[in-house]
Protein backbone atom coordinates (compact mmCIF):
# COMPACT_ATOMS: atom_id res chain seq x y z
CA UNK A 1 0.00 0.00 0.00
CA UNK A 2 1.60 3.23 -1.11
CA UNK A 3 0.86 6.70 0.17
CA UNK A 4 1.69 9.56 -2.22
CA UNK A 5 5.15 10.11 -0.75
CA UNK A 6 5.97 6.41 -1.14
CA UNK A 7 5.20 6.26 -4.86
CA UNK A 8 8.64 7.54 -5.88
CA UNK A 9 11.03 6.20 -3.27
CA UNK A 10 11.64 2.55 -3.78
CA UNK A 11 8.66 0.68 -5.24
CA UNK A 12 10.80 -0.87 -7.97
CA UNK A 13 12.98 -2.47 -5.30
CA UNK A 14 10.06 -4.21 -3.62
CA UNK A 15 9.10 -7.72 -4.58
CA UNK A 16 5.43 -7.33 -3.80
CA UNK A 17 2.12 -6.23 -5.25
CA UNK A 18 1.99 -2.46 -4.96
CA UNK A 19 -1.45 -0.97 -4.40
CA UNK A 20 -2.79 2.53 -4.04
CA UNK A 21 -6.05 4.36 -4.73
CA UNK A 22 -7.18 6.77 -7.41
CA UNK A 23 -7.39 9.55 -4.83
CA UNK A 24 -3.73 9.02 -3.91
CA UNK A 25 -2.74 9.09 -7.59
CA UNK A 26 -4.71 12.34 -7.99
CA UNK A 27 -2.51 13.93 -5.30
CA UNK A 28 0.49 13.71 -7.67
CA UNK A 29 0.69 17.17 -9.22
CA UNK A 30 4.10 17.24 -10.94
CA UNK A 31 3.79 16.39 -14.66
CA UNK A 32 6.88 14.16 -14.72
CA UNK A 33 5.80 12.29 -11.60
CA UNK A 34 2.27 11.87 -13.03
CA UNK A 35 3.81 10.32 -16.16
CA UNK A 36 5.88 7.93 -14.03
CA UNK A 37 2.76 6.86 -12.11
CA UNK A 38 0.81 6.48 -15.36
CA UNK A 39 3.49 4.13 -16.73
CA UNK A 40 3.62 2.16 -13.48
CA UNK A 41 -0.14 1.62 -13.76
CA UNK A 42 0.05 0.73 -17.48
CA UNK A 43 2.83 -1.81 -16.75
CA UNK A 44 0.81 -3.23 -13.83
CA UNK A 45 3.67 -2.36 -11.49
CA UNK A 46 1.15 -0.34 -9.51
CA UNK A 47 -2.39 -1.56 -8.92
CA UNK A 48 -5.28 0.80 -8.28
CA UNK A 49 -8.02 -0.34 -5.95
CA UNK A 50 -10.93 0.93 -3.97
CA UNK A 51 -12.50 -0.36 -0.80
CA UNK A 52 -16.14 -1.16 -0.23
CA UNK A 53 -18.25 1.21 1.84
CA UNK A 54 -18.09 -1.14 4.85
CA UNK A 55 -14.28 -0.78 5.04
CA UNK A 56 -14.50 2.99 4.63
CA UNK A 57 -17.03 3.18 7.48
CA UNK A 58 -14.76 1.11 9.76
CA UNK A 59 -11.80 3.40 9.06
CA UNK A 60 -13.86 6.54 9.63
CA UNK A 61 -15.22 5.12 12.90
CA UNK A 62 -11.74 4.30 14.25
CA UNK A 63 -10.25 7.59 13.02
CA UNK A 64 -13.11 9.47 14.71
CA UNK A 65 -12.76 7.48 17.92
CA UNK A 66 -9.04 8.33 18.02
CA UNK A 67 -9.70 12.00 17.13
CA UNK A 68 -7.48 11.62 14.05
CA UNK A 69 -10.28 12.12 11.52
CA UNK A 70 -9.59 15.83 11.09
CA UNK A 71 -5.92 15.06 10.27
CA UNK A 72 -6.78 12.66 7.42
CA UNK A 73 -7.66 13.61 3.85
CA UNK A 74 -10.16 11.69 1.74
CA UNK A 75 -7.16 10.17 -0.06
CA UNK A 76 -5.69 9.03 3.29
CA UNK A 77 -9.01 7.49 4.29
CA UNK A 78 -9.30 5.73 0.91
CA UNK A 79 -5.86 4.16 1.31
CA UNK A 80 -6.51 3.09 4.89
CA UNK A 81 -9.83 1.55 3.83
CA UNK A 82 -8.20 -0.31 0.93
CA UNK A 83 -5.46 -1.54 3.27
CA UNK A 84 -8.07 -2.82 5.72
CA UNK A 85 -10.10 -4.46 2.97
CA UNK A 86 -7.10 -6.27 1.46
CA UNK A 87 -5.94 -7.35 4.93
CA UNK A 88 -9.38 -8.78 5.68
CA UNK A 89 -9.20 -10.64 2.34
CA UNK A 90 -6.03 -12.40 3.55
CA UNK A 91 -3.37 -10.24 1.88
CA UNK A 92 -0.18 -9.46 3.77
CA UNK A 93 -0.53 -5.67 3.82
CA UNK A 94 2.15 -3.16 4.75
CA UNK A 95 1.17 0.49 4.55
CA UNK A 96 4.10 2.69 3.52
CA UNK A 97 3.59 6.21 4.84
CA UNK A 98 5.32 8.89 6.89
CA UNK A 99 1.97 10.34 7.96
CA UNK A 100 1.69 9.86 11.74
CA UNK A 101 -2.12 10.06 11.78
CA UNK A 102 -2.31 7.35 9.10
CA UNK A 103 0.20 5.21 11.00
CA UNK A 104 -1.80 5.60 14.21
CA UNK A 105 -5.12 4.63 12.62
CA UNK A 106 -3.52 1.73 10.71
CA UNK A 107 -1.96 0.31 13.86
CA UNK A 108 -5.30 0.48 15.67
CA UNK A 109 -6.76 -1.46 12.73
CA UNK A 110 -3.90 -3.99 13.08
CA UNK A 111 -2.47 -3.04 9.68
CA UNK A 112 1.32 -3.30 9.45
CA UNK A 113 3.03 0.03 8.85
CA UNK A 114 6.43 1.03 7.56
CA UNK A 115 7.87 4.51 7.23
CA UNK A 116 9.73 5.76 4.17
CA UNK A 117 11.98 8.13 6.08
CA UNK A 118 12.38 5.87 9.11
CA UNK A 119 10.25 8.17 11.26
CA UNK A 120 7.47 6.10 12.75
CA UNK A 121 5.18 6.61 15.68
CA UNK A 122 6.26 4.95 18.90
CA UNK A 123 2.85 4.77 20.59
CA UNK A 124 -0.74 4.12 19.60
CA UNK A 125 -2.58 7.22 20.72
CA UNK A 126 -6.20 8.20 21.23
CA UNK A 127 -6.46 11.99 21.33
CA UNK A 128 -8.80 14.34 23.12
CA UNK A 129 -9.40 18.05 22.68
CA UNK A 130 -9.28 20.48 25.56
CA UNK A 131 -9.37 24.17 26.28
CA UNK A 132 -5.99 25.40 27.53
CA UNK A 133 -7.71 28.34 29.29
CA UNK A 134 -10.56 26.73 31.24
CA UNK A 135 -9.37 23.08 30.93
CA UNK A 136 -12.73 21.83 29.64
CA UNK A 137 -12.47 18.58 27.66
CA UNK A 138 -14.38 18.68 24.38
CA UNK A 139 -15.54 15.45 22.76
CA UNK A 140 -16.76 16.98 19.49
CA UNK A 141 -13.72 17.03 17.17
CA UNK A 142 -15.50 19.41 14.77
CA UNK A 143 -15.47 22.22 17.35
CA UNK A 144 -12.43 24.47 16.90
CA UNK A 145 -12.82 26.66 19.97
CA UNK A 146 -14.09 26.29 23.51
CA UNK A 147 -17.88 26.72 23.74
CA UNK A 148 -17.41 28.27 27.22
CA UNK A 149 -14.63 30.84 26.74
CA UNK A 150 -13.90 30.87 22.99
CA UNK A 151 -10.21 29.87 23.30
CA UNK A 152 -8.86 27.76 20.41
CA UNK A 153 -8.76 24.10 21.42
CA UNK A 154 -5.61 22.01 21.70
CA UNK A 155 -5.19 18.28 21.56
CA UNK A 156 -3.47 15.94 24.00
CA UNK A 157 -3.17 12.17 24.35
CA UNK A 158 -6.16 10.58 26.07
CA UNK A 159 -4.52 7.14 25.99
CA UNK A 160 -0.98 6.31 24.95
CA UNK A 161 0.02 2.70 24.39
CA UNK A 162 3.63 1.75 23.50
CA UNK A 163 4.10 -0.37 20.40
Image (cartoon, rainbow, N blue to C red):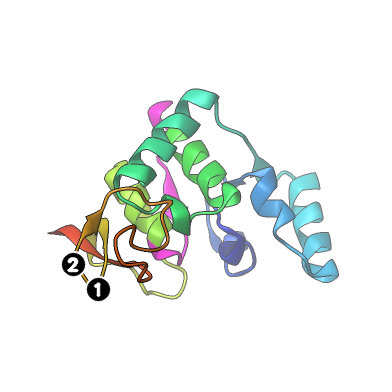
Which residue lies most toward the front here? 149
Residue underneath mark 1: 132
Q: Residues within 10 Å of mark 2 (few under 14, many from 20)?
A: few
Q: Residue at x 60, y 49 (%)?
A: 75
Query: Do tag 1 and tag 2 residues touch (Cβ < 8 Å)?
Result: yes
* Position of residue 19 measured from the top left corner of the image (x, y, whole percent): 59, 45
* Position of residue 147 measured from the top left corner of the image (x, y, whole percent): 34, 57
* Position of residue 78 measured from the top left corner of the image (x, y, whole percent): 56, 42
Q: Residue at x 24, y 73 (%)?
A: 132
User: Residue 135: which disc?
Assistant: 2
- In screen coordinates, is 104 left or right of 6? left
Q: Which residues are drawn in magenta?
A: 87-100
Asked whether residue 61 is drawn in magenta, I would say: no
Above or below for 99 versus 47: below
* Position of residue 102 measured from the top left corner of the image (x, y, whole percent): 42, 55
Q: Residue at x 18, y 67 (%)?
A: 135
- Give the quarter of the image for residue 156: bottom left
- In screen coordinates, is 56 left or right of 29? left
Image quadrant occupied by the C terminus = bottom left
Q: Nearer the viewer, residue 142 or 47?
A: 142
Q: Nearer the viewer, residue 101 or 12?
A: 101
Note whether residue 163 is visible. no
Give the tally of numbered discs: 2
Q: Nearer the viewer, residue 108 or 159?
A: 159
Q: Residue at x 43, y 26 (%)?
A: 89
Above or below for 99 versus 84: below
Give the secondary structure at mark 2.
Answer: loop
- In screen coordinates, is 49 left or right of 44? left
Amino acid sequence: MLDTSALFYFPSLLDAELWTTELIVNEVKDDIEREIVKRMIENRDLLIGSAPLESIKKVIAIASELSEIHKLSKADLSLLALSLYLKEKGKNVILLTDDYAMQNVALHLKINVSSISGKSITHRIAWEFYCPACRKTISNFRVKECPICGTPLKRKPKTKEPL
